[in-house]
Image: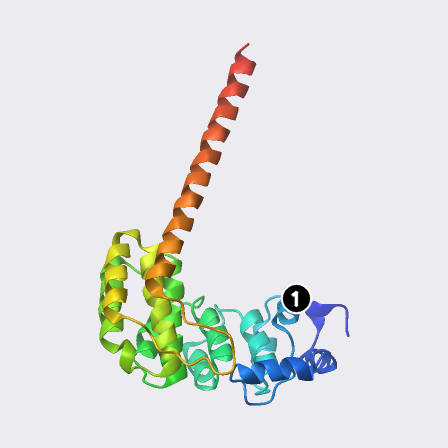
Amino acid sequence: MGEGFEAMTQVEVMAFLQERANPNTVRIYRRHGVMGACFGIKYSDLESLTKKLKMNHTLARGLWSTGIHDPRVLATKIANPDEATAEELQTWIEGCDNYVLTDAVSVFAARSPYAMALARRWSQDKREWIGSAGWLVFSALIQGGKVDAELAVQLLAEIETRIHGAANRMRHSMNSTLISVGGHIESLREEAIAAAKRIGPIDVKHGETGCKTPEAVAYIGRMAERNAARAQAAGGRTKARAAAGAARAAKTAH
């Protein structure tokens, strides 16, 4: 297999994946809506392979071109966001036909220089997977502190207006964006909770899985508690470091 994982060619990677094909995992993916060609590689194994292959956009493009689920997911993990073009990302999202791959492309798109433009355009698309991706990219941008309060307020209003009439998986993604606003933009937490209460229950079909769409009000509350706990812990560590520094300074002075 060449000098190492980083030197693997597309043919070698495909052979590596085929050797690890698992019919049982394929059946699990089928329950999650993956209907096309699929090897059945566990996500943990794809993550492990990602670390070994490292970033390789040329290889990513080749893996995407196979049209097979697992190589395509792997492609999103090793692709270079700075080498991807807006046209390429559009092609990739239009090639998605299930939420597993859509989520993977969305994570990658959110790291690209085109993330905001794609989020704005895709979120307006009424097609389930593209529209869903747009809201997922918005969610990632919010979590990364890249959405200001003014835009976030606009997103909350749009979610409230559109969510119940949106396609199935898009409802799930819009709910995720609402939660991201409430959980990551403290000044808008109460506004997000109020919007969630007005929206009410979200009906999302998850097929033959145990997956559920989070209840926004409760989830935002838990996020706020976790954030507060982390802030308190960080404050405690800062005080401990300051005390240790003061002790060292005092010892040196003596």
Camera-side residue: 177 or 216? 216
Q: Quadrant of the C terminus?
A: top right
Element assignment for label 1:
helix
Q: State the image coordinates of residue 69 (x, y, percent, origin top left).
A: 58, 83
109 on left or right of 55:
left
212 on left or right of 203:
right
226 shown above or below 124 = above
Q: Quadrant of the N terminus?
A: bottom right
190 shown above or below 178 = above
Residue at the spot of label 1: 48
Q: State the image coordinates of residue 136 (x, y, percent, origin top left).
A: 39, 71
Q: How many marks?
A: 1
Q: Amino acid at mark 1?
A: Ser
Q: State the image coordinates of residue 214 (x, y, percent, origin top left).
A: 40, 67
Residue 132 is drawn in which quadrant?
A: bottom left
Q: State the image coordinates of residue 189 (x, y, percent, origin top left).
A: 28, 55
Q: Which residue sits at x=27%, y=61%?
A: 192
Camera-side residue: 192 or 218? 218
Q: Which residue sits at x=28%, y=58%?
A: 148
Which residue extends farthest bottom?
36
Q: Which residue sits at x=71%, y=71%?
A: 7
178 shown above or below 60 = above
Camera-side residue: 81 or 146? 146
Query: Coloring scheme of the render?
Result: rainbow
Q: Which residue sits at x=69%, y=81%?
A: 22
Few, some or many C-alpha atoms within 10 Å of disc 1 (few <14, some 14-19, many ≥20)? few
**Camera sees residue 63:** no
**Camera sees residue 27:** yes
174 on left or right of 253:
left
